[in-house]
Each structure stands twice: as C-alpha cells, then as structure tokens.
Image (tube, rainbow, N blue to C red):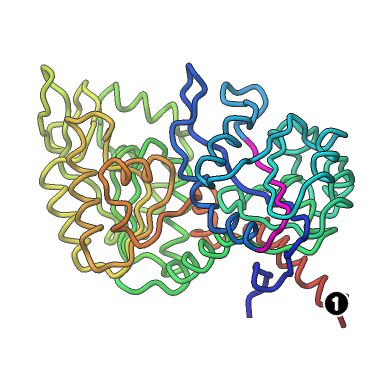
Amino acid sequence: MREYYTLDDIEVKNKTVLLRVDFNLPLDKETKEILDTTRLQLVLPTLRELQGKKAKTVILAHQGRPGSWDFISLQPHATALGKLLGCSVTFVEDTYGDTAKQAIQSMKPGNVLMLDNMRKVPGETDKKTPEEHAQSPLVKNLFPLADVFVNDAFAAAHRSQCSLVGFTAVLPSCAGRLMEKELTTLEKAVKQPEKPSVFLFGGAKFSDVIVTIERLFQNNTADKILLTGLPANAFLKAQGVNLGETNENILKEEGKPEHFDHIKIVLSAYHDNIYLPVDFAVERDGCRQEITVGDLPVHQGLYDIGEKTIRKFKEILSDARTVFLSGPCGVFEKPLFQQGTKEIFTAVACSDAFSIVGGGHTVAAVEQLHLKDKMSHISSGGGSLEKFMMGAPLVVVEALKKAKQRALVNTH
C-alpha cells in the first residue's frame, strides 16, 4: 500500500478538481515564446484521465518568479496546452479573485480551466506548513469551490509553497499520474537499484552535486560516479590541478572555498569510485583540439571531454545495470563539442541498463540527439530529483501522505 493516495483511490467523476502542475517552461528571452513543451506533455495522461471522468479541471501552475525576466502570464501556456490536448483550455487572468471564482463556478463536466501564474499570489513562495498555508487567501477562496486536490508537480515537490501544499490540509488529496510514475520509478532506482549502478554528473553547476555524491555513496545507491563538465573541473581543482584562468574564474563564480574543502573530504573517502576526465577538448583557431590533464593550465575553456575519457567512461557504463545521467558532458550546444555527450548518451541509450535522465539541459540534449524513446525514464525534476536521490523527504509528498493519514482517521 502506498503512503499517499493516487487517482485510483479518489472519486473525481463530475467533481471539481484543483490540479497543481509544474509548467515552468523554458522561454525565449527576447520574444517570451515557449521553447519546449515537454512539461506540458508529461501531464497529458493525468489531464486526459480527468477529462474522461468528466471532472471539472482547474489548473494551478507557475512561471518564473517575481522580478525575473520569465515571470509572465500563463496565457501562452493555456494556448499551447489546448493544442496538445486537442480541446479548448480556458484562461483567466486571475488567481483567486471574483473572476477566477466565477469561472470555476460556471464550468461544465470535462472543462479545463487555467488560472494565472501562482507566483503572482502574495505569500505563495513563503516556506510554511500545509496547515499555515491553508489559512492563506488563495486556499480560503478556492477550496470551498473544489472537491479534490491533485498534485502532479513533481519538479516542484521539494518546495513548501502555498499552492503546492496548502490545499492538502483542507481537501481530499492525491498524486497525479506523473507524480505517481516519477516516485515509483525513482524509488526503484534509488532505493533498490540493480547493480552495478553508475551515476554521471556534468553540466554547468557543481555546488549541489558534492552533497549528492556523498549521500549516494553513504546510502550504497551508487557504485561508481563519472564526472564531466563543471563538476569534473571542480574535483580536479580540489586535487590541486591548475585549470587556467578562464576555467578557474568560472569555478569561482559557482563555488566557495568551503565547497573545495568538502570535495577533498569526499575524494579522500571515495576516490576509488569517482572517475575524472583524463583529457579534454578546447577550441583553437575555430577547430576542436584535444589536450590531456598534463597539458593544463590552458587559457581556453574546457568545452568537452576527450576521446580517451569517452572510451574509459563507455567501458565503465557497459557493465552497468542502472545508469543515471544528470548534465551533458560538455558544451553540447556547440557542434564541435557534442562528441562526449553524443557518444556517452548514445552508449547508455543502446545498452540494457535501466537509464534515468534528469535535469532540463540533460533532457534537452537527449531530445536533440533523438534518444528520448531509448531511455527508460525521463524525469521532469531538477531540484526535487536531487533531493530524492539524496534520500531527503520531499515536502509535497509528505503533505500528500499526511492528507491520506487524516482521511483514514476521519473514516474510522
């Protein structure tokens, strides 16, 4: 038995359902147009099931945060979703005022309505308990109009925010199909991975990765960890390798001295199971040129892993039964430096290992390489996925568990 309810446990036929999703999409900075609709597509199974059961579905979502360039109205999201669903998705430029309430009250069975950006709600991003958030104007105004709360926002499951947890304190609540699928798949991969289990971390961030690596070894989740991109550079620097001014400056922007102290501790404990690049690709006169770690420092950026590293990493991955990919192996957006990402990701996609892909840039690389259908699981989560892998509880899931406990107490 699950500790939280799913759509199998709660009656939604002809009911008004508040559906919280994560539609925080990548946008074009100039035009604000949507660049990728993956997160809309991932929620389609939940939406189609609710429509099939003639529920009145009210979508709650967010985009950007106040003050950021991508903090916009959800009108374009409603239009894009309507095209994917093949039906009209009504949009109201309101979150919990009279316009929103009237729109909800006038819905007919099977209708889909999207409210405006939840981040426009005062106090939305305050870190409070579900019970405290339940006292907010958002929850107090909307919950009397609804019968059920469904949370399908796995990518935001680590955030204790009003529209994510507040309704669980006052309405029958359950996980949507995406949330259920993510949790089921990741529980299997993280808590009982088929061994050997290999994790690859790359991309342009490293500070959060250090704690994740430590926990993965402590929990016996990972057997081997391969590092590329900025995480690899940070670990090499911690070992005393001078990367060159350009690369050192990038690390300074992202990390603090204590991060490198922490890396030294992790390396001393697990150095036999952490694999770093032995060569890199740099750009010289508009061409790709490979250098070894012994050639460092260089003034060029380290844009990709080199062929020796690619061969070594593919050899390690060939024995793996579970593979987790988080972050590309280099600046894959530049054709000259796609080789590492392309070869490593293709090797994983063509293997018999259970493969999990997580994080926006990783998913984008998999899409670009046309490997999406060959990966076992594409996760919608970024921060929530890292938290889950570290064994930390996700506040949204805890709120859903509490809602089930409350419901069970009330029925006995």
Picture quadrant where residue 61 is located: top right
Q: Label 1: which residue?
A: 409
Picture quadrant where residue 138 is located: top right
User: Is residue 141 within the magenta segment?
Assistant: no
Q: Nearer the viewer, residue 342 or 371?
A: 371
Instruction: Please state if 186 lies on the left or on the right of 348 as rendered.
Output: right
Residue 10 in percent (x, y) is at: 72, 70
On screen, residue 114 above or below 173: above
Q: Nearer the viewer, residue 27 or 357?
A: 27
For image coordinates 60% across by 54% down, the residue present is 47
Q: Nearer the viewer, residue 318 or 374?
A: 374
Secondary element at image label 1: helix
Look at the image and give the residue range highlighted in magenta: 53-62
User: Is residue 57 within the magenta segment?
Assistant: yes
For image coordinates 47% across by 67% down, the residue present is 185
For image coordinates 63% across by 41% down, the residue present is 89
Residue 342 in percent (x, y) is at: 21, 45
